[in-house]
Amino acid sequence: MRDALPAWAWWLLVVTPAMGWVVLTRWPRRRTQPVSSPSVGEPLAVAEQRLRHALDDRALAPPDRARLVRLLERVEAARFSEQPAGAPNALLTEIDGLLERQPAGVPGPRWRERTGLLLLAGLLIGTEAAAQTQPEQFYEAGAYRAAMEGFRRRTALAPDVPSHWFNLGAAAYRAGDDAAALVAWVRAARLAPRDGGIRRALQMAPPADAATGRELWIAPVTPPELWLTGMVLWFTGWGGLLWTRRVRGRWMVLLLGGSLAAGMGQALAQWYDRPVAVLARNTQLRLSPHGLAPTAAEGARLSAILLLDRRPGWVEGEMPGGGRGWTPEEALEPMNPLPRP
């Protein structure tokens, strides 16, 4: 959600109500003028458009076409002439009655062209859907590694879809890769935190310790939900201030609640975006990125590690319970990897 607009656009949305408040408080309220009744020419103009649209029908019978042409001429004359109030009303009633009795026209070539384009689009979508069923077919056939690759490609193309991550975790769990399953199910749960199926799946690949559980914490709401709640409260509070032009307690409570919700959403998003990985096996963290370097700490399988730096083939990380060192890159299942140098 936050990526839908650039940062300057979000700041503009935030400060625009405040700017409107400043303008309105310095601008005197004007008394509203009574709204005049609509003129006769407006319904006649609408009737003229309806008649012209009806004349475009190619399947219109010649007698009906001639009658519509005569009505169109009368409408054009009535729009620019002064007549009694009843004359336009009678003309409009006659037009409504005639148009209601007209049968639906036969679709023309343009309709057929659009139908052909829709059929072609449906065929392309069906072909793409058939291609996307390949990971499920691998999964049903027991080829879990191949299914993992297919589901992993889907997560790369659509990382905000919880079902892609859930399917990747299921394939990884069946393939015996508990670290990949844990990472995928945590990603799915952070996108859909109230999904019971994902919560139950996480119980099949529990983290190694409580410290890892805290690192992989899943909030009951998502950052976009908090941002949306904050925006609604923020604009509702400013809307009340702009409408009443009075500073009242309820509007200030809404503004404060909106600010808190948006701030919590931003903090939660930053927590989720931290470069964290899960150890795929019991690993020794070394003092330098070299296989013969002294051991600095021990990392248990399915433990979380906060990524700090990387070298070719090696990643420096810090364990939640303490301990820092370098570990081989293949021993990690990254949740949010470090950017490559």
Image (cartoon, rainbow, N blue to C red):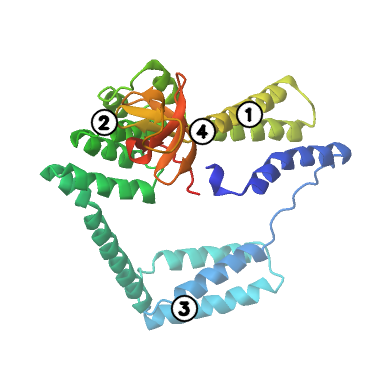
Q: Nearer the viewer, residue 318 or 235?
A: 318
Under mark 4, the amino acid is: Pro
Give the mark, 2 or 3, whose residue is nearer the N terminus. 3
Q: Do the residues labelled 2 and 4 touch (CB within 8 Å)?
A: no
Q: Is residue 40 left or right of residue 167?
A: right
> Looking at the image, is mark 3 or mark 4 nearer the viewer?
4
**What's the mark number on residue 67?**
3
Looking at the rendering, which quadrant does residue 127 occupy? bottom left
Amino acid type of the residue that numbered disc 2 sits on in the rendered structure: Asp
Q: Which mark is residue 178?
A: 2
Q: How many marks?
A: 4
Whole-Å distance between the Cαs marked 3 and 4? 63 Å
Q: In this view, does 3 lie above or below 202?
A: below
On screen, residue 206 versus residue 19, left or right, reads left
Residue 285 location (% of width, % of height):
40, 29
Element at label 1: helix
Q: Mark 4 points at which residue?
A: 223
Task: Residue 143: give x, y in percent of width and height.
Answer: 15, 45
Q: Name the residue under label 1.
A: 258
Can residue 146 be seen by looking at this rendering? yes
In 3D space, how far apart are the residues under numbered discs 4 and 1 (Cα atoms)?
13 Å
Dot 3 or dot 4, earlier in sequence: 3
Residue located 64% across and 77% down the image: 77
In front of the other: label 1 or label 2? 2
Label 1 crowd bin: few (<14), some (14–19), many (20+), radius 10 Å: many
- CA–CA distance in space, label 1 to label 2: 40 Å
Say which quarter of the image contains residue 326. Answer: top left
Q: Can residue 219 be seen in this view?
A: no
Discs 2/3, front: 2
